[in-house]
Image: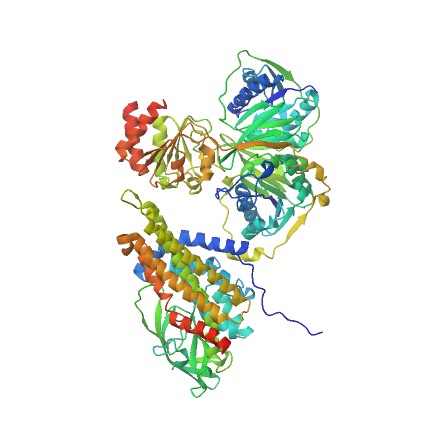
Amino acid sequence: MAEVTATTREPGPYRLTEEHEMLRDAVRVLADERVSPRAAEIDRTAEFPQDLRKLLADHDILALPFPIEHGGLGGELLPVALAIEQLSRACATTGLILMVQELGSLPILLAGTPEQHARWFPGLASGEHLIAFALTEAEAGSDAAAARTTATKDGDDYVIEGSKRFISHGSIADLITVFAVTDAEAPRHRRLSAFVVEVPTKGFAVARLEHKMGIRGSPTAELAFDGVRVPQANRLGAEGDGFGIAMQTLDRSRPGVAAQAVGIAQGALEVATAYARDRRQFGQRIGEFQMVGAMLADMDAATEAARQLLYKACVEIDAGSPEASRWSAMCKLVAGDAAMRVTTDAVQVLGGYGYIDEFPVERMMRDAKITQLYEGTQQIQRLVIARSLLGKDG
Amino acid sequence: MAGGIWVHGELAGDGSLAKLSTEVATLARSLAEASGEPLTGVVIGSDPKAAAATLADYVPRVLAVAEPETAEHAAGTIVAQRLAALIAEHEPRIVMTGAGAEGRDLAGALSALTGWGVLANATAVRWDDGGPVATHNVFGGKLVTESALTGDQGIVTLRPNAITAEAAPAKGKVEAVTPSGSLEQPAVPIVDRLEASGAAASIDDARIIVAGGRGVGGPDGFTLVQELADVLGGAVGATRAAVDSGWIPYSQQIGQTGKIVKPALYLALGISGAIQHKVGMQTAESIVAVNRDPDAPIADFADVFVVGDLFEVGRALLEQLRSRSG
Amino acid sequence: MRIVVLTKPVPDPASGAERLGPGGRLDRAASPAVVNGNDEYVLEKALKLVAEAGEGEVILLSMAPASAPETMRKALAMGATRGVLVTDPALEGSCTVATTRVLAAALKTLEFDLAFAGVDTSDGVAGVVPAGVAVLAGLPYLSYAATIEPNMGARTVRVNRITPTGFDVLEAPMPALISGTQALGEPRYPSLKGIMAARSKEISTISLADLGVDPATVGTAGATTRVVGSRKPPDRAATRVIRDPAEEAARQVVAFLAKRRII
């Protein structure tokens, strides 16, 4: 009889387990007590919160995306999403610390050798090292395959030339996963290869930092590669695998963006609800006005719908669903739009107070916008979903 | 079976009768009257005389058992063994004690030795259908339950401050009893006694308690709480949040994992009234609360609820009370 | 050092959803279960002591319905080594006497240096089980602990027992049973590693037959007490809300206190 090897997990039961709830609550307490009091200052100063990075490391939160044998907590998507959601509910910049750690590491997880895992994961799981993901270029955003940065073989090394733009944590990371063209003549999806660049290294420079509308504490960098030499041992997968690795990475990382969006929406909903309960006009609490009550109800329903789709997507992707791209695109699409609408409505509920920095909802509204943009705009998500639909029949 | 209701007289640290035991004795007397059961007090200790004499103010007959072992050993298990031996000899039906630390230790050990059930932490007890029926506040005061024994014999523990003690019209007799038999359970020596440093006025029996919560903001804020307690002649209490923050010692904590109090006035400053705290103070005769949050749960069970800054209102209150008393 | 911690799953007092079911018994489905608050304090102390000793284990012992492992996982996530659950359909409706007997019998099957229990539970609030278990297990009993200091060399343990004026310092040989209070210190939050590790920790179950306890002596059948009635407590009089400025508010409070003859 042939040996049967199970490579996919059974889908989880349709509710959070006790373990998930414990994990979520543990992060929530930390977010409420330690992250929330820092959020406004992080936004105002636009400085990366090294103290909160350490907090996340000390409490094993940065270990979530990594395999247990390398000091991680297993890397299942749902626990990662629960943690990102709770952190982002308090501060989207802090949620992004975990998101980028996952995003940058996924190419190693998906395409790396056991030696590469053992080499990089322990430092990343402990939070000692940060990692960034460098795919986007000034002229290659949604069209990632159009990248121009090159990696040229030279003896046992590759030499990288070019630049990357909009790279979260690009200026503070110790490792950067870089996608570069190794064969310009190959078909579109076979042009790129993926490399892990350990910085600082000769020829690498941070060209500039962006001034952003939201997630202001998270540094977004333009990176210059001027003859950066990386050994062949730092290549992930085979030459030409880069584009496929990047797309698989995004299938697993987009739920992280959705989790950030759900967290931001939940945070705004809570502020708006508390305000509607306290604020009195015309002799009554404003929440008792039907127009305000209805807004709150819609905000709650939209947030919960996005959350449930997110949790389901995590479980389906982890179970090896062949529709991973569809699930991950759908949850980010729905959650990003929910976050934008819920935060905008939260500002509306607070009226003039919502528009000033005395309350956090204006920050949340600015933070929410990025979830409709990065790791694929909402338009790209719709493209992915439509292809999945039409491809089935066609 | 001989029958009867017994009251355990608990010794305070100085050898006098604990106040809680006078409350238990008063309740036991009403049960004895209702049931016709004979009433007996039992005091067990290295020097039971003084406490036995006080207990005789409440019950017609007191057994004073001189047990030298309790002088230098934790009392609960020893007292339980002596009581169990006396029960075997005299066969009473009901043993009543306080639901404080001493009474609970005694009741637990006695229950294990006799197999008798415990009607625990009663706020009131009546005699009905041939036995005691105990009233309990459960689920943080959301529900009142009544429970009874399934057999003829059992133990009742009474919560502190549940009833007002009242002496009997006539003083009872004290009989000295010499314990017999050996103590089988391991005795635990008391190797030292420590006074708690800076022990504040006890909240257990205070007529007025001024209590502070998280809203007080820190140890400095408790100065105002203390000043108000001083001018009112009361004691300072606190919530778990204030105790956990290290602003005030655990001995002053009121609530689920602290003490249960029933003062004439409970003045709550910066206390939200979460269920865990409410359990400890909801039976206060009058509750006055000052809180900035108009939706604080304490607004639902205070007699007077002031919406405002506790420092502003507290200082105004302090001035007016001082000018009144001065 | 090996410490057994008696833990009880109780309805979450913060949920506000506790209620009684048929026969006056606790309706466990009505509200989420948590580890009893006082048990968490002794568990925290046990975890610290074992960590300081550098070796040993913390074993949880519960008597509870078969659904209790979920709650026990929380205590395991805090760092306990393994759990022992006494569960049997016949135990439903057990009184404190039966609970004491069963826990004492289960304790006798374990090897340990110290056994800890919270001074009482938030659902029953009887506070009589720890003393009873000590008696039936023949263990020295040290109650209302504010501090616990074991001496493994001498195989003794010292406890500061809370008294109305301070502390009695108690000392006993191991093994001993200690009931502890909140004064032992705040319980930790489970770490994420602890939470993830908890799922692979062992929870063994014991039945009444394993302990040789007659089912007729426990549960509703063997109960020494029974609930005969329940009612909602009488409402307090309506709250008088004062929203005036401090001076005026204070004046009204003083008037209230005078009217009630408090001052």
Task: Report x, y in % for residue B53.
Answer: 56, 16
Q: Position of residue B259 (x, y in %)?
A: 48, 33
Q: Residue furthest top?
A: B170
Image x and y of residue B101, in percent: 55, 31
Residue A31: quadrant of the picture: bottom left
> Quadrant of the rendered structure where residue B182 is?
top right
For residue C9, above or below residue B61: below
Q: Nearer the viewer, residue A217 or C10?
A: C10
Left or right of A388, for residue C176: right
Q: Residue at x 72, y 39 (%)?
A: C214
**Does B228 sit above or below residue A290?**
above
From where the camera sits, is residue B164 visible?
yes
From where the camera sits, is residue A42 visible? no
From the viewer's perspective, tell me whether residue C175 is left or right of residue C192: right
Name the foreground residue: A345 vs A168: A345
Q: Nearer the viewer, residue C142 or C172?
A: C142
Q: Quadrant of residue A43?
A: bottom left
Q: Give how far across and how far down residue C81 sits, in percent.
A: 60, 52
Residue A300 sits above or below residue B247 on the image: below
Q: Quadrant of the C terminus of chain B?
A: top left
**A87 lies above or below C215:** below
The colour scheme used here is rainbow
User: The N terminus of chain B is located in which quarter?
Assistant: top right
Along the line of sight, the residue nearer the viewer: A392 or B286? A392
> In this rendering, would A90 be left or right of A326?
left
How many numbered marks, from 0 up?
A: 0
